[in-house]
Image (cartoon, grey):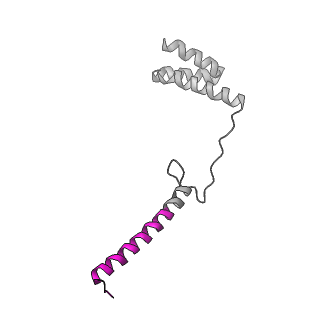
Amino acid sequence: MQRKNPAVRELNRVSTALKELAGAFQGLGSVLVATVSSNGTSRTGTRQRAKPRLTAAWRRALKLQGAYMGTIRGLKPRQRSQVKQIRAAKGVRAAIAAARRMAN
């Protein structure tokens, strides 16, 4: 019976240990992939917030707000204050119309 070199025996032990370690990391990787969402935030222990359903009225209000903000953006400070006064007195639609006239 032939005896193996002690160095060969140790290399075989190290090789076996590395194979076991690689298998453990593969298992860990699949668990991590399952618990991390696509944007990198962890899903464990946190609930995903439901996307709010927009009613037609809410959508119209948001669109009106966006139009108001868009027309105000290009105005000078004095014009902005005038438009804000119009909004307080007559409403958002009148303020948007006045801001558009001032911008031209």
Q: Is residue 18 depicted above or below 55 in this figure?
A: below
> On the image, which quarter does residue 66 sit in?
top right
Q: Is residue 27 depicted above or below 12 in this figure?
A: above
The reply to whether the magenta stretch includes residue 4 is: yes
Q: Is residue 84 depicted above or below 34 in this figure?
A: above
The reply to whether the magenta stretch includes residue 23 is: yes
Q: Quadrant of the N terminus?
A: bottom left
Going 54% across and 17% down the picture, which residue do you hit?
99
Position of residue 39 in the picture relative to residue 50 (left or right):
left
Residues shaded magenta: 1-28
> On the image, which quarter does residue 84 sit in?
top right
Going 51% across and 14% down the picture, which residue do you hit?
102
Going 63% across and 48% down the picture, which residue do you hit?
49
Q: Is residue 10 depicted above or below 91 in this figure?
A: below
Q: Measured from the top left, where is residue 45 in percent x and y?
A: 60, 60
Q: Measured from the top left, where is residue 39 in percent x and y?
A: 51, 47
- Frontmost residue, 47 versus 3: 3
- Frontmost residue, 33 versus 16: 16
Does the magenta stretch mainly form a helix, a strand or a loop?
helix
Position of residue 4 in the picture relative to residue 21 (left or right):
left
Going 46% across and 65% down the picture, which residue do you hit?
25
